[in-house]
Amino acid sequence: MTDQHGELDAALERVIDAARAHLTAVRTAQGRVDDDDVWQAYVALNNASCAYDEQLLDAFGEVTPWDVESIDPDEADERFGAAAEGVEATDPHPRVISVRQRRDYRVPSVAALIRVAEAARREGTPTDDEPVAVEGVGEAVLELLQSGDGSLSALDVPELEPLDGVVMVSEVGASVDLESFDDDDPVGPFQPADDDRLVGRLDEHPFLDLEDEEHDHAGHRH
């Protein structure tokens, strides 16, 4: 029984040492997410606690309040997605997802669209400078995007009527390298690579105006 008590005391000391090491790692990390030292200290504390709990149960039939299961350090990175120092974690899922989107618009009035774009440009121009006039539909749409948040929601204006669009999601091997394409290249940045895998395609259709829809139904009644 003396040896068993000694082993139990040693197991408890390992828990205390592991808890102190974990606290030190947490303080050193200062809130960094996915800090490797914190993760390694966590695994050590978890396993020390689990071992002490098992030895306490064997010796006295008692357990601790810690509901933990042993973590294999060699499998921990793969199970939890943390990379050990100098070791790349094996993850069966792709690291890069590509979302390609196209949406077309009808322009009911070119003049109205240009007026809206010029108003947006004036808001973003210093008061002492005279804004350059917006030339053409394409420049007007680009100005709305740049003046907004850069997403297509910036084009949700009455001066543009959305038509059909499409969104495609692909698993890709690497993210796009914009520096490898010319600024006026309309295809390159959107061209899928040979090893890209299309996951799915979502077709977008604009919502019809309810009054127009009801009018169309009424016109087809017999």
Image (spheres, rainbow, N blue to C red):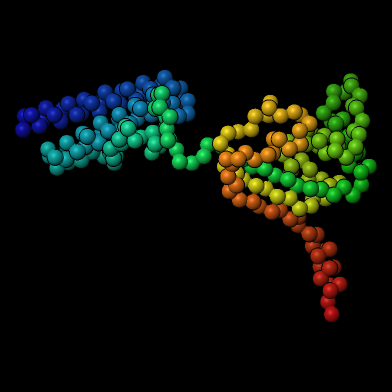
- Residue in the image at 56% along x and 36% along y: 173
Position of residue 65 relative to residue 219, above or below, is: above
Residue 146 pos. (x, y %): 78, 33
Position of residue 191 relative to residue 44, above or below, is: below
Q: Nearer the viewer, residue 19 or 135?
A: 135
Q: Name the side, left or right, on which 23 lies relative to 127.
A: left
**Picture quadrant where residue 88 is located:** top left
Residue at the extreme bottom of the image, as rendered: 222
- Residue in the image at 31% along x and 36% along y: 71
**Picture quadrant where residue 142 is located:** top right
Quadrant including the N terminus: top left
- Residue in the image at 16% along x and 40% along y: 57
Q: Name the side, left or right, on which 131 lies relative to 27.
A: right
Residue at the extreme front of the image, as rendered: 194
Residue 80 pos. (x, y %): 40, 37
Q: Nearer the viewer, residue 17 or 219?
A: 219
Residue 185 pos. (x, y %): 76, 33
